[in-house]
Amino acid sequence: MNKKKDEEQFEIKIVVDDAVAQGIYVNFLSVLHNKAEFVMDFGRLVPGRQDVKIQARLISNPIAFKQIVKTLNENLERYEAHFGVIAADMPPPKGIVQ
């Protein structure tokens, strides 16, 4: 069989359990990296507080991280094409100590 044809027909079934399907609200992201991995800390920054509660930490390899960034960019472009450009003129918070 043709290997390329087999790869094109490959489908991934996505399964989300009930607890994960509820989702977690985040409005903060910190990214750390070394040669082998990217560490993404997703958190919630609450107005009037100096701390950020990290809600989830995702760790990925560089290839998957680049694919994630590409997918996020593509979806942001689709969103803005449909709903309009997001005004993101507010700078990220400064002075956060990890």
Image (tube, rainbow, N blue to C red):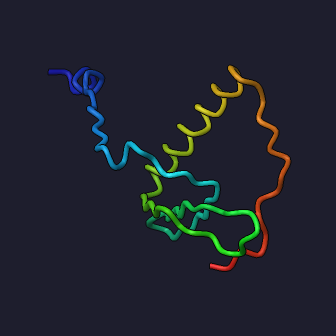
Front residue of 86/31: it is 86
Q: Residue at x 83, y 52 (%)?
A: 90
Residue lying farthest to the left in this orientation: 1
Image mark count: 0
Q: Position of residue 62 (x, y in %)?
A: 47, 56
Q: Position of residue 69 (x, y in %)?
A: 56, 45
Relative vertical location of residue 89 with respect to residue 36 in this rendering, above or below: above
Left or right, residue 57 beside residue 98: left
Q: Quadrant for the N terminus, please.
A: top left
Relative vertical location of residue 68 with respect to residue 62 in this rendering, above or below: above
Relative vertical location of residue 94 with respect to residue 74 in this rendering, above or below: below
Left or right, residue 70 beside residue 2: right
Q: Splitting the image into 4 quarters, where does residue 52 fall?
A: bottom right
Q: Residue at x 45, y 51 (%)?
A: 63
Front residue of 32/3: it is 32
Residue lying farthest to the front in this orientation: 48
Q: Quadrant for the C terminus, please.
A: bottom right
